[in-house]
Image (cartoon, helix red, strand yellow):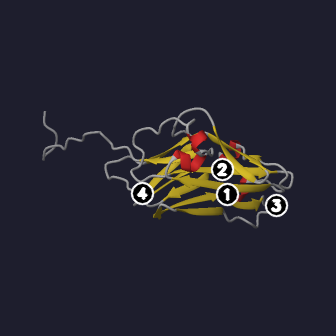
Amino acid sequence: MVAWNGPCDSATTDDIVLRIQNPENAAQVLTVSVDRAVLNCGERGILSIALGQSLAHVLGSVAAGQVPTLPDGFAENGVLFDISIVVSDDDGQSYTAVPSSRLVSRPVRFSLSGLNLPADSSPMFMHFPTGVTMASENFRLTVGSGSWTQTAIQNVQIQGTTLSAEALSLSLFAPFSPVDDTVVVPEKPGGPTC
């Protein structure tokens, strides 16, 4: 978790970056980068990440039961993670989720390293709607309604064992590496024949 104040001048331009290592697999590191200007001058924000091997590890057992089963293709050694940002405009007296409209021009960037991604797969992230409430300085993740989807995730890239993307809304994320079942039949030497 990391807190910051919205910039009141253009002199501070560095991103807010939070890294978390998977305690079950030291090779896996989730890195989340947020443009600090997603907050307005005078606002205070908190970026929070929850990471775990299962839905229950991330959301708790009761909330995990409200999430549909993961679709086929969940990455072999993948982890689930929730990214949340809350914002306060009253000096931290109350917080609400950052409006998704702000993320359209300033998407949250994230990468997950240490994944086993087969060469014949089509790696991607999917997400499921979650929310966050904050009372007495404690975060509480809440489960939304809907289904696992790729919407609001853009610029997915793979480099070695690292999968990265940008999110236009914050929620629960999971890496997938469905095997591409498209069969390519090589042409005979000299080109196709009829």
Q: Which mark is residue 115?
A: 4
Residue count near mark 2 (Cα–Cα under 10 Å), binned few <14, some 14–19, many ≥20: many
Q: Is 159 above or below relative to 145?
A: below
Q: Which residue is mark 1?
A: 35
Callout 4–callout 3 Cβ contact below 8 Å: no
In the image, what residue type sits under mark 2?
A: Ser
Q: Which mark is residue 71?
A: none
Q: Position of residue 115 (x, y in %)?
A: 42, 57
Q: Earlier in the sequence, mark 3 or mark 2?
A: 3
Q: Which mark is residue 84?
A: 2
- Label 1 and label 2: CA atoms lie apart by 14 Å
Q: Residue at x 75, y 55 (%)?
A: 45
Residue nearest the viewer, comparing 79 with 42:
79
Residue count near mark 4 (Cα–Cα under 10 Å), binned few <14, some 14–19, many ≥20: many
Q: Earlier in the sequence, mark 4 or mark 2?
A: 2
Callout 1–callout 2 Cβ contact below 8 Å: no
Q: Earlier in the sequence, mark 4 or mark 1?
A: 1
- Label 4 and label 3: CA atoms lie apart by 39 Å
Q: Earlier in the sequence, mark 4 or mark 3?
A: 3
Quadrant of the image containing the C terminus: top left
In the image, what residue type sits under mark 3?
A: Cys
Q: Which residue is mark 3?
A: 8
Quadrant of the image containing the N terminus: bottom right
Q: Secondary structure at mark 4?
A: loop
